[in-house]
Image (cartoon, rainbow, N blue to C red):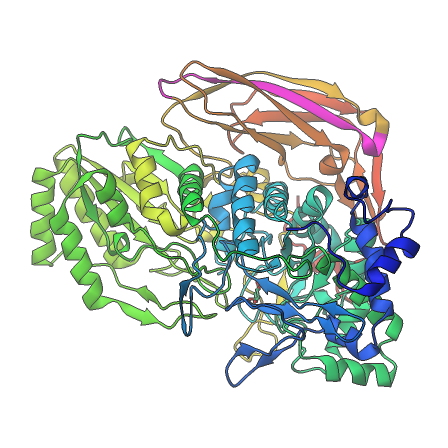
Amino acid sequence: MSDFKPQLKIVTMAVAVAISGLMIGCNDNSSEKATVKDDAYYKSLAEQLVSQMSISEKLDIVSGPGMDFTTFANNTPINLVSDASGVAGYINGVKNDKLDIPAAKLADGPAGLRINGTRDGDSGTYYATAWPIGSLLASTWDTALIEEVGKATGEEVKEYGVDILLAPGMNIQRNPLNGRNFEYYSEDPVVTGKIGAAMVEGVESNGVGTTIKHFFGNNSETNRNYINDIGEPRTFREIYLRGFQIAVDEAQPWAVMTSYNKVNGTYVNQRKDAVTNILRDEWGFNGLVMSDWFAGNVMGDSESAAAQLNAGNDLIEPGGQKTNLQASMDAGSLTEAQVTQNAVHILTQVQKSPSYNRYAFSNNPDLNAHATLARKAGAEGMVLLKNSAALPIANSKTVATFGVNQINTYKGGTGSGDVHAAYTVTIAKGLANRFTVNSDLQDYYTTYFATNKVEHAGSFGGASTYSCDEALVTGNTELSTLLTTAVQNNDVAVISIGRQAGEGADRTNAKGDYLLSDQETDMITAVADAFHAQDKKVVVVLNVNGVIDTTAWADKADAILLAYMGGQDTGNAVADVLSGDVNPSGKLAQTFPASYADVPSSTSFAGVDNDTDGTPDDTYYNEGIYVGYRYYTTFEKAVSYPFGFGLSYTTFGYSNAAVTENSLSKGAKGSVTLTATITNTGSVAGKEAAQVYVSAPEVKLKKPVIELKAFAKTSKLDAGAVEKLTFNIPAKILASFDQANNQWIVEPGTYKAYVSPSSNVTDTTLVTFTVDKEIVVSNTTAGALALADGVDAASVTTISK
Ligand code: BGC
């Protein structure tokens, strides 16, 4: 892409006049390299562009073209120079005798670029790579790998002619039943922020944009457009905003998408304290802020769009709000100065886009290379939860595969996080590619699925998906006979359990969803009894969107692999791990609790139905900052598999943990650095994700007993090899939020730090560092995100130390 091509006559003037201080001889290539093309530069040009626009044109910029509800297709945007079928929305362009700004294209999403794979009247294909879901990517704990995935994703964005990706999804996995958890990274904000930043860096290295979403508090799908999150500012700041803050700080994405929900009574996209004071003023965000699609009650409230612009939400998507915005201007509730500012924010980013720069995209990204990388990322993020000498499966062994999910394998979730990929490798196929499998069993499940599947119409233009009750073994003569033969002829059983989820609905704590169905329990029991009677091993593969119960059945399995949804090459990636071709190094970025009832938000999810209309209205964030492992460790609740946990085919020793530098006496700019030595103490090569948990002193503020503050992954270490890892924790990551004083502070005292393989730090040798006096890391906006008048904090946060 040519780095910069003036789109209009006035740009030359702008270069010469408005930003002459930044630009040295714009027609001279050598000196152009010296130009700092940062957001200040583009903002200056954007101001020039917008100054040439009529108010009508400015309103076109701040409101997308809208959607035709008879066909549910986007209306045609202004000055669309080239299209990409299946994008989610557009930013209108401008075309007049002075300006020629092409429309920009926006497309989902978190597991890869969501555009149509085929087009009417066109024999070409436009498939994109279906990457592993966000939860799996985060479980790699490998920011370099995520950046690579981002780079490849961004190449598809660019080469298919799209400008801004509507991803990554960075909401916190507050509760396992959120239907969109699969799109998100973690229950922890540091993991979320660091993985999100790496994704942004990778995608944007192509000269296309990202949109971190959904800012913030979109942590359930039930009544998602209207739900009101009620919580204390500290809860939102430390848990639900912090990941976004880290991503802005480290990667400065082009865009932020605000969420559907309200926070403390007001839609987030209409909260100036969130969108302007916190995001822009406190964090220094320079990009554009867009609404989620139809968010903020735009269809029910003609003043909603104006309220969003006034709050600093620059772009209304999918748009179609021009008439309402004009009416608000006429009524005096929206000023031209406000619209100008919103339009400048948008055009600052649009100028960097391929469409603006007339990039000649190829429609030919390197899908083969990306398929290899997707398979690699899939295997790197799968988490080995249990292994009693069952894995890896030796080449010489024959494998009996059970479960309809081996045929009905889920590459990812549904909704806007889906991807139109060219193929999905099922678990049956992946295992057959790698091992000698029992083909009679695979044929049985193929036929069973074809006969018993239930079709669910695709959402968001996606293909249909299928569910299928598991085949009972008990009382099923055909399957029982196949089982008997398999036990005689095969060495090991691999059982697949699947769970689909998607946008628009939450999951349930019921059989067939969070719990195993009766048929699944029957299958696991029958297969385990039969194979164990012959001293043969049983492996369970979980092809799931998120957490399911394992307590009820884990003892029946010799090995459990959490495969999540591994993208288009799920089956091959599962085989890579089961065979030992890839030594698993994924670790949980969300806790597997012992029971759903142990989840701190189990009683408040998905909200209370105040008006008894059958849908929840308010969700009380009763657990405050005690989300995920912060709760289980502080309140000493046993869990099935702790946050940060994952097994390997080798073992690792941790030694020489030390604090090597403590510059916290410098205050807000200070940091603490730790190192530790990781040794591969086993017999095969492998990688280890090491985590630093900090236990902070409590002076004014109560705190979780431990919090993750840094992590790093070793390179692939041969047996016996050693690597020294370094962890840096800046004061701002160490800080807690003192809501009484509107400050991020680091409290004085002795801090304990654990360099640990997981959040279970009981066997980890601690090191300490001290902070002499309180550090005020930053002062924040007084009263931001406050509880609504009359709501008492003690009635909201009911779980506290
Ligand atoms: C989703 C967003 C998505 C948008 C456009 C909305 O329903 O919440 O995540 O980017 O649709 O497809």
Q: Quadrant of residue 215?
A: bottom right
Q: Evaluate whether residue 558 shows in this view.
A: yes
Q: Evaluate whether residue 591 shows in this view.
A: no
Task: In the rendered view, tell whether residue 179 sits above or below residue 656.
Answer: below
Task: In the rendered view, tell whether residue 741 sits above or below residue 161.
Answer: above
Residue at 69% from the left image edge and 39% from the top image edge: 703
Is residue 290 shown left or right of residue 487? right
Q: Is residue 681 in the magenta section?
A: yes
Q: Is residue 347 in the magenta section?
A: no
Instruction: Give the x, y percent position of residue 425.
Output: 31, 51
Between 658 and 122, the one lying in front of the other is: 122
Between 731 and 643, the one lying in front of the other is: 731
Magenta part of the chain: 667-684
Task: In the rendered view, tell whether residue 7 sits above or below residue 25.
Answer: below
Q: Quadrant of residue 96?
A: bottom right
How many numbered markers are drawn?
0
Quarter the C terminus occupies: top right
Task: In the rendered view, tell whether residue 794 sits above or below residue 778.
Answer: below
Instruction: Give the x, y percent position of residue 205.
Output: 63, 45
Residue furthest out toward the front: 28
Instruction: Give the x, y percent position of residue 101.
Output: 72, 67
Residue at 63% from the left image edge and 71% from the top image edge: 80
